[in-house]
Amino acid sequence: MMPEMKIVRISDDALARALGADKLADAFARLGHEVQRTSSWGMHWLEPLVEIDGNGFGTATLDDVNAILDGSSDKAIGRIDEHPFIARQQRLTFARAGKTRALSLDDYQATGGWSGLRRARQIGSEQIIEDVLKSGLRGRGGAGFPAGIKWRTVAAAPGGQKYIVCNADEGDSGTFADRMVMEGDPYALIEGMAIAGEAVGADQGYIYCRSEYPDAIRKLEAALRLCAHIIAPFRCEVRTGAGAYVCGEETSLLNSLEGKRGEVRAKPPLPALQGLFGRPTVVNNVLTLAAVPHILGEGGANDYDALGMGRSKGTMPIQLAGNIKQGGLFETAFGITLRELIEDIGGGTLSGRPVKAVQVGGPLGAYIHPDQFDIRFDYEEYTAADALIGHGGITVFDEDTDMSEMARFAMEFCAAESCGKCTPCRIGAVRGVEVIDRIRSARNTGIARKRDVVELSPVMHNAPKDNGRLPEQEIALLTDLCETMKFGSLCALGGFTPYPVMSALRNWPEDFVRGSGEVVGLVLDKAGA
Amino acid sequence: MIDKTQRIGEILAAHRHREGPLLPILHDVQEEFGCVDIEAERLIATGLNLSRADVHGVVSFYHDYTPTADPRPQVQICRAEACKARGVEKLIDRATREAGDRVHVKTVYCLGLCAAGPAARVGDRLYARLDEKSMVQVIENA
């Protein structure tokens, strides 16, 4: 007897493919079932996730195929949309995640696609900007600047040619929401860009995507070909980055698009007035632009404004990553606490050991101690705690982590990725690695570094001729260096690298200095840091 | 072997009309020849009416462009925070030993698979949730 043919839905997101989703899809297809490759639900710990009639099976392997089909599989998780991880979310930007095929125009249209752009074209520039302002949408790239104000500035700027640039250089470790939008719902991003173009009077858009995301580039290019007639006269193309983290900074990104070294520009002039090729330019993150079609839909701005807390409105796609049991994408209104995110939703660490630290906001974000887990997700509340939301990535570390090693890595990363234009970042990061190396070596060996031959030679008049710095003096030096980088750097790379370093030092002094770490506290108090 | 001057000329012609053509050109040249060497820089500079210093400045800025071609297969391993939190550092020694001189192991920072690290990339293929065994396999098959 021929078995009944089923519709099997498997994600073609890069993460699912990296875990064997393609082979799994082939296996179902070979058995005569119809396989639909959809976007990912964002439950990454369950990928590859197989969906049949709304029921999920994960993590599925080739050995599970027969059991899944005959209903006997122990990988069954019940209905996906009723799974607590999905049911607890408020998905606006990711409303289509898991439900549609990324490149299907029919799927996009059937789920309300292009209605934001249609309405935008009817209401005109001023009203679009009014709607975006009313929604309270703030830039999701990290800085949290109100999108509507940026758009209004560009709209009012004189000059013929204007540009919409999408910052898709998502280099922060622990973040993948941009990638999921580009791979799973590319039309939403393109629609957001077309609406921005309508609002400010720009007919050309560029999506600057990092080269580490080949799947996203391929999908965006295909999507742009398929929807060119819908967004016309707006035109858009994808540009591929070349492996420079700093190009996620907007002015550096603009230089890179122009075909120059990705060096940061001094501001002012603001990109809104003199951006790409000196023209007025909107530079927004993928998540910001992808949130726009919903806001421009009927009543969307009010919906958005009703969610969130304080001045942080709407929803934030939060990314749970690192050593966490249930990692993935969790979109929810602002105001949720870290404890809820990590313990209730994420299920604690993957390793099962206690959480030691959580880094929020990528490599430039502060390490947060479990004592601070009641902090609520809100731009202002994080700033007050000397931390940042950044792009909404949360990376969890268990107790095996050596925080002085993570502080060293922050400096090492800054040194590797610095564009070299300003001194605090270019040289400070290198010196930072050296200082932390000395601190760590004193901790491991119990012997502080002595002055070397060069320092002791008579011609080095200014070098002190003593026995070398004590650990507390090295800590004071590091604190001082971080102050210089924080206030003297041109952009966030050098300016924010002190956040992970200083937060690690403040919260886990015992990882830097032998014994109780009390000396660190004394030094920090004295420095007022 | 195709004539390098001619091939670079074709790449230049394909992109010259675009706004900001240099990076797309460099990507194509890197892809075609495995590197952007001095000769290529000279041809591109002439073609775009830039100085060689301008072109060299750009080529040397970005991690994706290399001055010489490496015939070995390349395995990129992510060693950023999220993959560190999931234990990638414990795999590095073994990976380097396994690679030896045959495979080029390159450190990258973030492949966007942060909830399923450690992650690696070979060409356009990605691998996630690697342990020692699967990491060795990735390198062997590279």
Image (tube, rainbow, N blue to C red):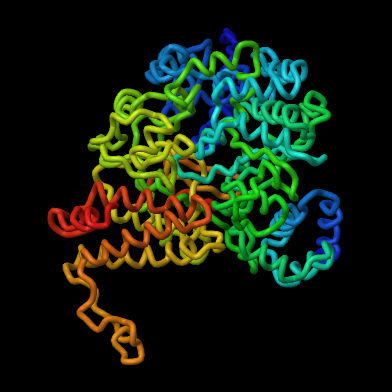
- The vertical placement of A150 against A104, above or below, is below
* Residue A115 position by quadrant: top right
Extreme residue toward the left, this view? A515
Q: Is residue A209 left or right of residue A465?
A: right
- The vertical placement of A422 against A177, above or below, is below
- The vertical placement of A493 against B69, above or below, is above
Q: In this orientation, does residue A166 appear?
A: yes
Q: Is residue A237 left or right of residue A65?
A: right
- Residue B137 percent coordinates (x, y): 46, 49
User: Residue sitting at 42 percent across and 54 percent down?
Assistant: A486
- The vertical placement of A90 against A327, above or below, is above
User: Residue sitting at 67 percent across and 47 percent down?
Assistant: A240
User: Residue sitting at 61 percent across and 52 percent down?
Assistant: A252
Extreme residue toward the bottom, this view? A458
- Residue A180 percent coordinates (x, y): 56, 32
Q: In this orientation, does residue A17 appear?
A: no
Q: Is residue A161 left or right of residue A393?
A: right
- Residue B48 percent coordinates (x, y): 82, 62
User: On the rendered image, what quadrant is the N terminus of chain A found in?
Assistant: top right
- Residue A2 percent coordinates (x, y): 59, 9
For this rendering, which residue is in front, A412 or B120? A412
Q: Is residue A467 left or right of residue B2?
A: left
